[in-house]
Image: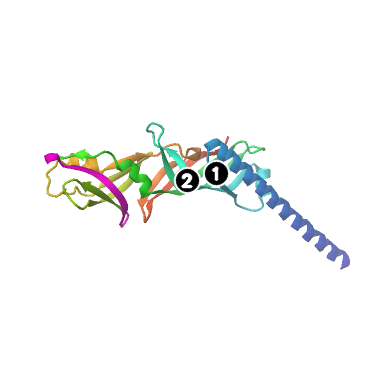
Amino acid sequence: MRALRILLIVAVILGGLFVVADRVAVHFAEGEVADRLRAQEGLASTPDVSIEGFPFLTQVAGGELDDVRVGMKDYEADTGTGGQKIRIDDLEANMRGVAFSGDYSSATATTASGTASITYAELLKTAASEETELPLGITAKVVGLSDGGNGKIKVDVKVSALQQPVSVLSTVTVEGDTVRVHADSVPSFGGVQAAENEVRSITDFEQKIEGLPGGIKLDKVQAARNGVDITVKGSNVQLAG
């Protein structure tokens, strides 16, 4: 009985040491991946990297991590227009099947999915262009974006002949790497008769979003309380290397 007791104590101690070693190793790996991802993407701050699953060392022995989660704040994406950027808030991605090199200099996920958001204030930079001239010398431009409810964006247009902005509900969609905002119906600007294409040149707009980390792509978009919520996805996504 004494020998069995000693054996159990040794097993518990070894098990505890293994858990400690496993957690130390995963913490080191998370830091390495985060540092390399920051350098690769030119980020202003180090992203949050969390390697899920236990034990970590068993995954390392197999050369592939089951689940790696990455979080980035204020990611600056390309717009395809003269080096201009658009800020993406709270970009989070869940990477599956991450194969990596021994020193973590390269890491590639088989698949990735995630979420992100763009504030209405940030998206307004695209819509708020120069004033557009309509018939009778009247001008108009987009001056505000907000949640219109039921997955719609409310677009406020300032018309020179009116004291209050005209509001229109719009649908937001994704086509490839572009977010498009399209008015559900063409508004009347205080009785001013204008061709539909003239009105839509003001109310409708689009924003290209390129260069997301690791090559992930836009998937879906929906209007929300403080901005548009985006889902992203990808395959063979590079975390490092």
Report if residue 58 is visible in the image. no
Q: Is 147 inside the magenta-drawn segment?
A: yes
- Magenta-drawn segment: 135-151
Q: Amino acid at mark 2?
A: Asp
Q: Is residue 32 left or right of residue 127?
A: right
Helix, strand, or loop for circle 1? loop
Towards the viewer: 53 or 3: 53
Q: Is residue 43 left or right of residue 199?
A: right
Q: Residue furthest bottom?
A: 1
Are dots 1 and 2 in contact, CB under 8 Å? yes
Quadrant showing the N terminus: bottom right
What residue is disc 1 on?
Answer: 45
Give how far across and how far down residue 82 sits, in percent: 38, 31
Towards the viewer: 186 or 167: 167
Residue beneath the point at 40% across and 45% down = 219
Quadrant showing the C terminus: top right
Residue beneath the point at 75% across and 58% down = 16
- Which is nearer the N-term, disc 1 or disc 2? 1
Give how far across and how far down residue 163 sits, in percent: 19, 52
Residue beneath the point at 69% across and 48% down = 25
Give how far across and how far down residue 227 sits, in percent: 37, 51
Q: How many marks?
A: 2
What residue is disc 2 on?
Answer: 74
Residue beneath the point at 35% across and 45% down = 123
Towards the viewer: 11 or 75: 75
Q: Amino acid at mark 1?
A: Ser
